[in-house]
Image (cartoon, rainbow, N blue to C red):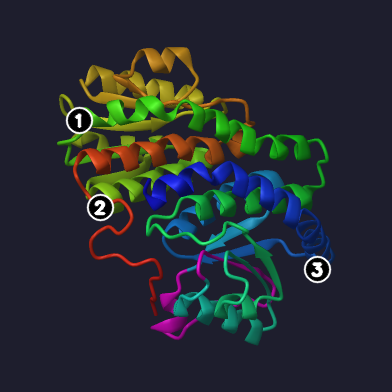
Amino acid sequence: MTHIEREIFAQPGVLDKLLRLEGKRIEKIAKSIRKANIDTLFVVARGSSDNAGQYGKYLFGARNRLVVALATPSLFTLYKRPPDLARCLVLAISQSGESDDLCSVVEEARRQGGRTLVMTNIATSPLASLGHDVIRLHAGAERSVAATKTYTAQLLALAMLSRALDGRKADRENLARVPEVIERTLDASGSVAGLAERYRYVERLSVIGRGFNYATSFELALKLKELCYLTAEPYSSADFRHGPIAIVEEGFPVLLIAPRGKTMADLKQLARSLVQRKAELLVISENRALRSLAKTILPYAAGLPEWLTPLSTVVPGQLFAMHLAAARGLPLDVPRGLSKVTRTR
């Protein structure tokens, strides 16, 4: 078994551990954030962690009514013109905690008197040492270059913080169900290898989500790029209509991420348009009407509220990317030109 396969299947256990070990710490951090009367969240991350930050943008905006901005580190490192962060909570998200540009942003925030929070898997990392508070992901060593279990741990940590900030006790039950829902998807994963074989020679496709799952479209496109060497481009269903839909021709594959929620009607409408253009649809959804339009239905366990679905929708895509890379005869754990820790300035 490859490292990436072990790490994909380790996710329910990782998430259960995170819920057990970090719940009280996150409650304490949320209490201090509320006391500080912070209304702006400034998120800095790279790679898959940046996609987790995209989820945070919708999560903290929709649930906590916070203004959320995603950092542009080059303003700090290259242009030396950082924004005013004195009244922000700066949230750094990183698997390794070793990227120099992330550290530069957090250092500058501290210099300005801003509050800093770090989410990382490595508690002894340089980035963790800069945080006023640190949330540990408890994912264990991740040996595959392509992040899987640290990504879902980041999503869950963000969701736990959002719930702690708004204080809705009923949502604790929804959070507690996340590991079991992911386990059910993994239990149905046996069919994915055969499904992926159909796309062995595909060179390009689009990945589409919206709302909370806009982040999922970016993460799954990234997985398909780094594991399968595909030209996989992520879009929201709204943005896709503003020009990119022109690339769709007969047989063009489009992966739609469409769990139950406020974005469903829009995604179904887009799916019907794509079928009229003779695109080939792959779907991650429980909706029967949408599934009936698809050539390929990836296994997906429903049961979470919309704000938590990015944790469950990403797993079928992880499995698909892994099996497609295997079908193409590509190295699963060390994609060409990549390393586990990427240092950027």
- Residue 303, compared with residue 119, is above or below; it is above
Local secondary structure at mark 3? loop
Residue at the image point whose x is 65% and y is 82% from the top: 110
Q: Is residue 77 magenta?
A: yes
Task: Say which mark, if any, is on residue 331.
Answer: 2
* Kind of residue sitting beneath label 2: Pro
Any part of residue 139 in sight: yes
* First of labels 3, 1 by sequence position: 3
Residue at the image point whose x is 22% and y is 38% from the top: 327
Which residues are the magenta region?
72-96
- For the residue carrying disc 1, how many other residues have a C-alpha within 10 Å: few (<14), some (14-19), or many (20+)? some
- Residue 204, compared with residue 57, is above or below; it is above
Q: Is residue 304 left or right of residue 221?
A: right
Local secondary structure at mark 1? loop
Task: Say which mark, if any, is on residue 252.
Answer: 1
Q: CA distance from mark 1 to mark 2?
A: 26 Å
Q: CA distance from mark 3 to mark 2?
A: 48 Å
- Provide the major secondary structure of the magenta segment: loop
